[in-house]
Image (cartoon, rainbow, N blue to C red):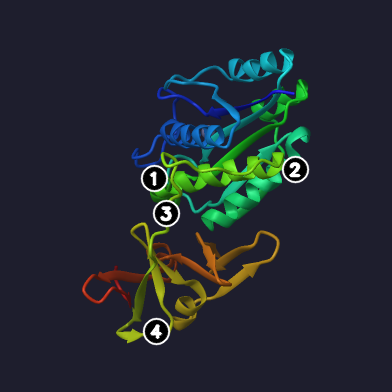
Amino acid sequence: MKRVIMIDPGHGAETAGKRSPDDTLREYEFNRNVARRLVKKLQTSGFDARLTVNDDTDMPLIQRTNQARDLKRQGYDVLLVSIHANAAGNGGWSTANGIETYTNDQAEKLAQIIQRRLVADTSLRDRGVKRADLHITRETAKYGIPGVLCELGFMTNRDECMLLKTDAYREKCATAIAKAICEHYGVPFKTSTENPQPEQKPVDKVSIEINGKRLSVQGYLRDGVSWLPVRAVAEAVGGKVEWCATTKQVKVNGKDVTEIIENGTSYAPARELAAILGLAVEWDQATKTVKLKKGCV
Ligand SMILES: [Zn+2]
């Protein structure tokens, strides 16, 4: 049977509210950028991949799923994957973070592969594969079409918002989803010269000083954000660190922090961690040191 993979970039330029609190990121722009990369990658690997929307308009949801339905009625094996960025809170910045994938019954296996690859490649928090009464997953299910909706990080989280604006992150997400689709259908993932793999940026280590004393452990710089080892920093100033096994989320002094786990160690953005611990942050460019101080900020 002939297969068509429909990639749906959520929302449009005029969709109200779908933006970061500081208005530096519009969701439709991120969604379209990732969706276009994903379509190209799938085409390079030999799939008939198509966008549901080619311009910046907010096509009504019913038209998006009807396209998939019509292709199915024409005898195609259809998959619909919708691309989104997440939001939480009431208009301001929020600490909610991580990646989640919504699925219908028909796409459960694929959704698991997509979620696993996204989390492995981005190192963001795994919020899991979920079910919800969303138009994309519900309407596709009516026609027996596998439907998936990916939420690729929170534009309402300061650090994830910075990440969502980078080409490197967009490329990472598109590659992870393309590889997952290839894996699911047993098709080798191919790259072309116009479709290069993202370059792995070297990781810059940063030193940490607390009240003038240097810690033995280091943090690192990624996309302009300093990430510090949560436990070492918190405990150096008497902070309380807890880890919740059910949510797999670390808490400092009872508050959730944005975290990335590298080699079994939780790292959090310096600014966020310092705020929770009541510390002032200074960055010394010459020595690549994050200086944390007790006292007024
Ligand atoms: Zn959305």
Q: Can residue 130 be seen in this view?
A: no
Q: How far apart are marks 2 and 3 (CA)?
A: 30 Å
Residue 125, disc: none
Residue type at tag 3: Asp
In the image, the residue with mark 4 has its CB under 8 Å from the nearest atom of ligand 1: no
Residue under pointer 2: 109
> What residue do we see at 73% from left, 36% from top?
107
First in sequence, mark 2 or 3: give its number. Answer: 2
For image coordinates 38% across by 39% down, the residue present is: 25
Q: In this view, does 66 lie to the left or right of 290?
A: right
User: Residue at 62% across / 35% down in the picture?
Assistant: 149
At 35% from the left and 85% from the top, the residue drawn is 214
Q: Name the residue carrying label 3.
A: 159
* Mark 1 vs 4: CB contact within 8 A: no
Instruction: Decide: few, some or many residues near mark 2? Use Cα within 10 Å; few <14, some 14-19, many ≥20.
Output: some
Q: Mark 1 or 4 closer to N-term?
A: 1
Query: Looking at the image, is mark 4 or mark 2 earlier in the sequence?
Result: 2
